[in-house]
Image (spheres, grey):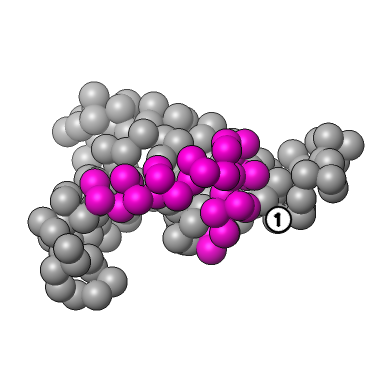
Amino acid sequence: MGRRLDRQAADDLTAEVFLAAFRKRETFDPGRGRVRPWLYGLASNVIAVHRRAEARRLAALQRSAGTDDDREPGHEDRVVTRVDAGSAQGRLAAGLRALPDGDRDMLLLSALGELSHEEVAQALDIPYGTVGSRLNRVRRKLRAALGGVNPLHGGSDG
């Protein structure tokens, strides 16, 4: 989670994930696989709740733009500043934001969480075969949003 959120939010949400895991410990089925994908599934749910709350806060900030110039810069302001720092980052952020939540979660679990396709399938409770095809589609969309450039390789990727 630390790669998806600022440190304080990641710490708070990590605590929420482990609290949820403790509360739902009896629902974990070792026969379905390892605990790591189960925890990532819980984390995806906790992040989804956080994302909805953050979207409401951002909408409220947008509505009140210009009325509270004295406010302290918050997490949202830091994110905007970082994203605006580079055009590729801006295009990548826009591409990620345009993805459906499930596709974005799948990509981030795979890329940032370093989960295997099987673990992503287990974490999101989707068929294994679906993961590879959706990830390929999502990567093509992001590559197109970046003008055909793969930022990991610094050039055209096509």
Q: Spot the residue most to the left.
A: 147
Left or right of 31, for residue 113: left
Task: Say left or right for 63 vs 32.
Answer: left
Inspect the image, locate mark 1, and give the three-letter code of the amino acid beneath it: Arg
Magenta stretch, main secondary structure, is helix
Q: Residue furthest front?
A: 129
Q: Which residues are magenta?
A: 113-141
In x, y percent, where is residue 105? 47, 44
The residue drawn where x is 14% and y is 68% is: 156
> Considering the image in quadrants, where does the C terminus appear?
bottom left
Q: Nearer the viewer, residue 95 or 78?
A: 95
Residue 158's place in the image compared with 70, above or below, is below
77 horizontally vs 130: left or right: left
Split into 4 quadrants, where in the image is the N terminus?
Answer: bottom right
Q: Position of residue 147 (x, y in %)?
A: 10, 56
User: x, y percentage for residue 32?
Assistant: 78, 44
Q: Secondary structure at mark 1?
A: helix
Residue underneath mark 1: 36
- Is residue 116 or residue 86 the one in the foreground? 116
Q: To which quarter of the image does residue 64 belong? A: top left
